[in-house]
């Protein structure tokens, strides 16, 4: 019998509850116990923990958010926290931690493993930027939200003959804007992985106009680099990341493209709507596969890695291989974008 501690770390994403349910049901099948730490590392530090039962995880498969909360706390920002984590790990006689998290979580897990606290990371983030998996839990649902938003925006953009600039989340990668833009029929996609020129986008818009299209929808990832002076003094979070939306990337492109094309431009920042919603079946199935695989690895005593999906296979990537790396939009998908723009 093993005692599995679970917690959620980083930004929330649709599918977290599906993975909590999969971990728990698989653990119970094997005679293991599950301890849920409330609000991520905050709960582990405070020892705010609840024993998970079959009833706890009943009826949550389709729920967004996290039944055990989440937080974006860097436990290594305070030396006392590591000792408290070690103490509470022992106090609950845990075998390992299963961390439902993102790239920052992988880095934390690596440091914890170096301090003798074993863990397995299940990659959950709408950004899809965790090294060690083709897709992360939450990404597919966020793409559906973005593509649905573009469907809605087509009507108003074409009726008013406007440029509609849509800013997506994604922190440092363009997966959300790329997949959401392709699925939603954006007329141009701007992402950190592809160098852009405002003038080139403007001439693409002009070309569309000559073809009788008097509107355009331009999707822009929030992490798209702007000029040096615009990057100064942006408010940052506990991990040094710019706070989402503060870089005003969508408004920058609207202002510049309106100047160059003389077409009225409006901006829609999708923001935190991309983090909500009922998880798609794709995200639910990914959550189930990765949750069960994490318990299988834990049962075999295989720790300190990221459980992921590569093609149709579940894979295990050691923490030291994933930590510090980023999964950027891959060339095959970038090539798709270039066909359309
Ligand atoms: O979880 C990923 C993400 O949604 C990024 O796309 C975004 O930049 C960031 O989290 C926002 O972080 P917070 O929820 O802490 O504002």
Image (spheres, rainbow, N blue to C red):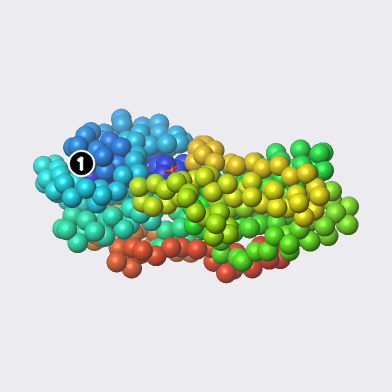
Vertical placement of residue 241 versus 37, above or below: below
Under circle 1, the secondary element is: helix
Give x and y (percent) for residue 95: 17, 51
Ligand 1 closer than 8 Å to label 1 CB:
no
Give x and y (percent) for residue 79: 18, 50
Identify the residue at horizontal 79%, vertical 61% (top origin): 203
Is residue 91 shown left or right of residue 50? Answer: left
Is residue 271 or residue 304 the one in the foreground? Answer: 271
Vertical placement of residue 324 versus 162, above or below: below
For label 1, the crowd category at 10 Å Cα-Cα, with few meaning under 14, some 14 to 19 and many 20 or more, is many
Is residue 223 shown left or right of residue 251? Answer: left
> In which quadrant will I find the C terminus?
bottom right
Residue 282 seen in this snapshot: no
Identify the residue at horizontal 58%, vertical 41% (top origin): 270
The answer to which quarter of the image holds residue 57 is top left
The answer to which quarter of the image holds residue 332 is bottom right
Q: Which residue is mark 1?
A: 45
Is residue 225 or residue 9 the one in the foreground? Answer: 225
Give x and y (percent) for residue 155: 77, 39
Residue 302 seen in this snapshot: yes
Number of marks in the rendered image:
1
Identify the residue at horizontal 54%, vertical 41% (top origin): 271
Is residue 145 or residue 260 the one in the foreground? Answer: 260
Is residue 1 shown left or right of residue 320? Answer: left
Give x and y (percent) for residue 147: 64, 46
Identify the residue at horizontal 45%, vertical 53% (top origin): 136
């Amino acid at each position: 019998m093993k005692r599995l501690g679970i917690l959620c770390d980083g930004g929330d994403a649709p599918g977290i509850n599906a993975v909590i349910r999969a971990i728990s049901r698989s653990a119970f099948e094997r005679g293991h116990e599950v301890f849920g730490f409330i609000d991520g590392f905050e709960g582990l530090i405070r020892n705010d923990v609840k024993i998970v039962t079959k009833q706890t995880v009943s009826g949550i498969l389709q729920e967004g958010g996290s039944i055990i909360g989440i937080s974006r706390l860097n436990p290594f920002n305070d030396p006392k926290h590591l000792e408290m984590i070690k103490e509470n790990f022992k106090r609950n006689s845990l075998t390992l931690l299963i961390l439902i998290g993102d790239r920052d979580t992988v880095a934390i897990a690596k440091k914890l493993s170096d301090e003798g606290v074993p863990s397995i990371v299940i990659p959950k983030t709408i950004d899809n930027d965790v090294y060690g998996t083709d897709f992360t839990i939450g990404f597919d649902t966020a793409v559906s939200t973005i593509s649905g938003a573009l469907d809605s925006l087509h009507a108003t953009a074409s009726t008013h003959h406007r440029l509609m600039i849509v800013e997506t989340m994604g922190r440092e990668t363009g997966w959300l804007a790329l997949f959401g833009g392709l699925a939603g029929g954006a007329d141009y996609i701007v992402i950190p992985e592809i160098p852009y020129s405002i003038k080139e986008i403007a001439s693409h818009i002009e070309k569309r106009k000559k073809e009788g299209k008097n509107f355009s929808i331009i999707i822009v990832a929030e992490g798209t680099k702007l000029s040096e002076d615009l990057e100064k003094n942006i408010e940052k979070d506990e991990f040094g990341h710019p706070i989402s939306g503060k870089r005003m990337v969508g408004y920058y492109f609207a202002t510049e493209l309106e100047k160059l094309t003389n077409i009225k431009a409006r901006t829609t920042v999708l923001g935190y709507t991309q983090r909500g919603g009922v998880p798609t079946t794709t995200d639910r199935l990914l959550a189930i596969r990765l949750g069960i695989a994490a318990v299988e690895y834990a049962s075999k005593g295989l720790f300190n890695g990221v459980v992921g999906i590569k093609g149709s296979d579940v894979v295990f990537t050691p923490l030291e291989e994933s930590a510090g790396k980023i999964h950027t939009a891959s060339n095959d998908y970038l090539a798709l974008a270039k066909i359309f723009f």
